[in-house]
Amino acid sequence: MNAAPTTRRLTVAQALVEFLAHQYTERDGRRQRLIGACWGIFGHGNVAGIGQALLESGTALPYLQGRNEQAMVHAAVGYARQCDRLSAHAVTTSIGPGATNLVTGAALATVNRLPVLLLPGDTFATRPAEPVLQQLEVPYAGDVSVNDVLRPVSRYFDRVTRPEALIPAAMQAMRVLADPVDTGAVTLALPQDVQAEAYDWPEEFFADRVWRVPRPAPDAAALAEAVRAVRGARRPLVIAGGGVHHSEAEEALRAFAEATGIPVASTQAGKGSLCHDHPCDVGGIGHTGTATADALAREADLVIGVGTRYTDFTTASATLFAEPGVRFVNLNIAAFDSHKLGALSLVADARAGLAALTDALAGHRVEKEYEAAYGAAKEEWERRVDAAYGAADASARPSQTQVLGALDALVDESDIVINAAGSLPGDLHKLWRARSRRQYHLEYGYSCMGYEIPAAIGVRLAAPDRPVWALVGDGTYLMNPTEIVTAVQEGITFTIVLIQNHGYASIGGLSEATGGERFGTAYRFRAGDGTYTGAPLPVDLAANAASLGMRVIRAATVGELRVALAEARGANRPTCVYVETETADTVPGAPEAQAWWDVPVAETATRPAAVAARAAYDRQAAGRRRHL
């Protein structure tokens, strides 16, 4: 007779933690932990369940103590992106506000297609007394809790209402986290009573399990059609998206570009796919792109998208690709994205697809005149970058672009620069000279204020030997500085470059351009007429950072900034460089937007600024087109 299956009696929470400790991904023969650690803030909804289980597990699943639930998700996302989506973190919270605080982070993860496992507590499955603390009462449904707000921002959602239901739910969760197409936020809502309930689990549930990440090749017929399109194009352009990095396809892209001479522009997520000094790299594309890339896009007769979602910033709200007969070839592992813009679809892994294209195009190269033209335009743009970065007077207060110039002069290929929101993404996309594949870390799918500091912690956990810089404006800093305490507690060394410009500079400029006259965008006292146009607020964000445990270096001039950045780069503890910038646009050659972005303007108004902005909007909107 066969022996009875071996079981182990554990609580649901203990079983889940044990299960997570034995999950792995594997790609190209390299294996790593799928869930590297678990962030957690504990309340009554998870302290006696997941909290107790993490304590009992010891080091089997490392625990990280966070201060803000949204920030814990941001840290987990930063970690996953740095790991090329092959390793992720879990995040556990109590039921109630702790759980709903996950929503913004979950949306960010899913929009950017980056894996994170969310483990919020939930109200009682057995309903011993209702309503319990923090229970949402819905008259028409007894099974709804606040966790249901996570459904639309999760790639997979389940509520584990019985112990045995954990097994299929956990397996589905791992499948989605490891899937390069379906990945994003995964939520397993865990009722607090079920977390603590014991069950006899089969030992097979805790065996090492490997989730292999494939590299699917393109369909032969589709590849042949794409090759014909490339061979027939006179002015082709590659747009490299985040999928190039996720697939580790940078070398394949470089080989393709060098073999064909086709220029490569990049989205925010794809920047660094080619290093800035590669002859085929023409910089950022779209609204925040370079003049070189955007001019090429307007004249391109074939656009080859690699791992891009074609957001409105990339397409300049459907106005950028102006050539009447322009066609698209989209290489993407997700069929949903590969069919956008009426493209010829190549559903494949970016590295495998690029290698196949390179082989099939052997001997083909664009005309020398085309290469010479974009090469000259690239050189001209670099001179504009030098002008924007330059500072003749070291004793002057720096502009924001001069802050970037000082950092650019200091870093090498090992440094990682992180940003997400404000006016910095535009300057970085246009100006930053990416030196390595993962140096440029912009979260621009969701562009979430408050992402930078916790993400820097996650990135540093994934890359402990690389200098990490979180570039933060004052508005973003005030949104979410609390994980500074976590960095200090854990001894996670990184540098915040805190730029004080007294308000929402990016939205202020956008407000002015759209007829809003910078209403409600400055951090100032009220003036006599009731508007926020008085003196700047006397806040001291440097003192705040110091109070949270950071070492702070203040820099008032360009010269002091250069010294401060160099000192911070060599620091062995979390450090903040605080600099107040010149807000007036006095920098020679400071680049403006090179392409349009559709932000609707009031169709009828009495104030002259809005009337003029609407006229300009109508002129730009007339250039929109649908690519079919």
Image (tube, grey):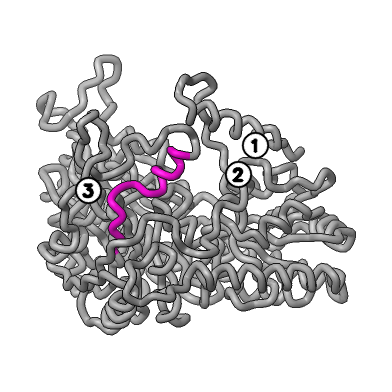
Question: In the image, is residue 501 part of the stretch drawn in magenta?
Answer: yes
Residue at the disc numbered 2: 596
| Classed neighbour count for the residue bearing mark 1: other residues with Cα under 10 Å, few (<14), some (14–19), many (≥20) | some
Question: In the image, is residue 622 part of the stretch drawn in magenta?
Answer: no
- Mark 3 or 1: in front is 3
Task: Label 3: state its secondary structure.
Answer: loop
Identify which amino acid the numbered label 1 is placed on.
Gln
Residue at the disc numbered 1: 620
Task: Label 2: state its secondary structure.
Answer: loop
Along the line of sight, the residue nearer the viewer: 385 or 415: 385
Task: Label 1: state its secondary structure.
Answer: helix
Residue at the disc numbered 3: 536
Disc 2 + disc 1, Cβ < 8 Å: yes
Percent position of residue 411, x then y: 42, 80
Circle nearer the N terminus (3, 2): 3
Q: Residue furthest top?
A: 140
What is the distance, in whole Å, between disc 2 and disc 1 at their CAs?
Answer: 7 Å
Circle nearer the N terminus (3, 1): 3
Percent position of residue 274, x then y: 61, 72
Q: Residue at x 18, y 61 (%)?
A: 65
Percent position of residue 451, x then y: 33, 55
